[in-house]
Image: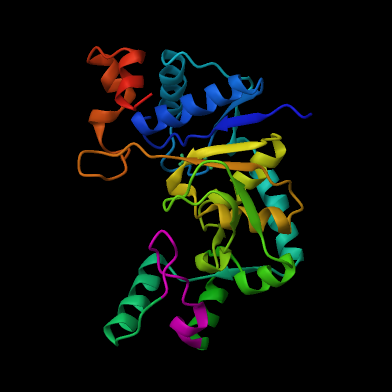
């Protein structure tokens, strides 16, 4: 039997809060109960928002909670070459295209369509699906933009990717989706449209790096918040296209604020560091998150 491998994979673009504490503790305890390994991974591909100070804060907070993890810790910014290799593989399959529209242009195109009474399709996170360069810019302006080479994102051609992936995709869910889904879940990546695989200023994306890292690190159990339940469909598609193993997925409940919303990193009062400084103990944190 293979040793179960769990991971907690925060992004150092804000301070850890109570929601992160729940995820980290659940992973740590599940690994221990299964006689498995617990890894910590730093997801810092966004070089503009992630800082060494916030990364150091993650280590301090988790150690304070009584958790320990294997070293060395994998830091995504040390592995851009790995994501490039995967991107090259998807490109060789003909599944990647350059996308030139800025966020503002996408928003403008969607607003115009909606003002004209069209219902624009949105992904499970509520973001509008990509309208397509030629449709928004027109062939002339698109040509000029390509010639000016001001940079572009790389997107997955979803329709083609689904054809290449072949049969239906699924995952094994041992936690629960937002509607209580569990067991064998049919993945429907098409709902996400042509997802971004690399940005103008970031040579990879969350979806791409997370599947590469989970495979590289031999992660067998992905335990994370329910807000990432739907994203699993994209992860399954990329795993299939890149011949990567399929981990078991366990999406856990979220810690909500008093208005019923997911905690955000910009809210200081649920940050673990602030709670510690105001005298809370690790046991208090456990009580606050219902453990
Ligand atoms: N880095 C992601 C976050 O902080 C989590 C990724 C994952 O667990 O798959 O939300």
Residue 254, by quadrant, is top left
Examine the residues drawn in magenta and state their main secondary structure: loop
What residue is rendered at 66% in x and 23% in y?
A: 36
Q: Quadrant of the C terminus?
A: top left
Q: Is residue 157 left or right of residue 273?
A: right
Residue at image point 57% right, 76% down? 147
Q: Which is more toward the observer, 194 or 1?
A: 1
How far across and how far down the image is residue 288, in percent? 29, 24
Relative to residue 45, is residue 91 depicted above or below? Answer: below
Q: Is residue 101 magenta?
A: no
Left or right of residue 167: residue 275: left
Q: Can residue 17 be seen in the rendering of this structure? A: no
Quadrant where the image shows the N terminus: top right
The residue that appears at 44% across and 45% down in the rendered structure is: 226
Residue 129: say if magenta: yes
Image x and y of residue 88, in percent: 72, 58
User: Over which residues does the magenta segment extend?
Assistant: 121-138
Asked if one can make out residue 287 in the rendered structure from this viewpoint, the answer is yes
């Amino acid at each position: 039997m293979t040793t179960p491998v769990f991971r907690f994979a925060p992004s150092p673009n804000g301070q850890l809060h109570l929601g992160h504490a729940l995820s980290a503790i659940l992973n740590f305890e599940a690994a221990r109960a299964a006689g498995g390994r617990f890894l910590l991974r730093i997801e810092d591909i966004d070089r503009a928002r992630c800082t060494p100070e916030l990364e150091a804060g993650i280590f301090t907070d988790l150690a304070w909670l009584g958790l320990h993890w294997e070293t060395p810790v994998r830091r995504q910014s040390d592995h851009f070459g790995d994501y490039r290799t995967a991107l090259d593989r998807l490109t060789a399959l003909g599944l990647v295209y350059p996308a030139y529209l800025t966020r503002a242009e996408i928003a403008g195109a969607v607003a115009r369509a909606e003002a004209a009474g069209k219902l624009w399709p949105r992904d499970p996170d509520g973001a509008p699906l990509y309208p397509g360069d030629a449709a928004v810019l027109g062939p002339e302006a698109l040509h000029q933009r390509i010639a000016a080479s001001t940079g572009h994102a790389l997107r997955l051609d979803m329709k083609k990717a689904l054809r290449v992936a072949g049969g239906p995709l699924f995952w094994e869910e041992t936690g629960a989706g937002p509607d209580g889904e569990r067991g064998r879940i049919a993945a429907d990546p098409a709902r996400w449209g042509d997802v971004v695989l690399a940005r103008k200023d970031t040579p990879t994306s969350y979806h791409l790096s997370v599947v590469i890292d989970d495979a590289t690190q031999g992660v067998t159990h992905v335990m994370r918040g329910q807000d990432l339940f739907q994203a699993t469909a994209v992860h399954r598609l990329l795993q299939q296209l890149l011949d990567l193993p399929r981990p078991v997925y366990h999406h856990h409940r979220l810690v909500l604020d008093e208005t019923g919303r997911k905690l955000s990193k910009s809210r200081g009062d649920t940050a673990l560091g602030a709670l510690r400084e105001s005298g809370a103990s690790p046991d208090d944190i456990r009580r606050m998150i219902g453990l």
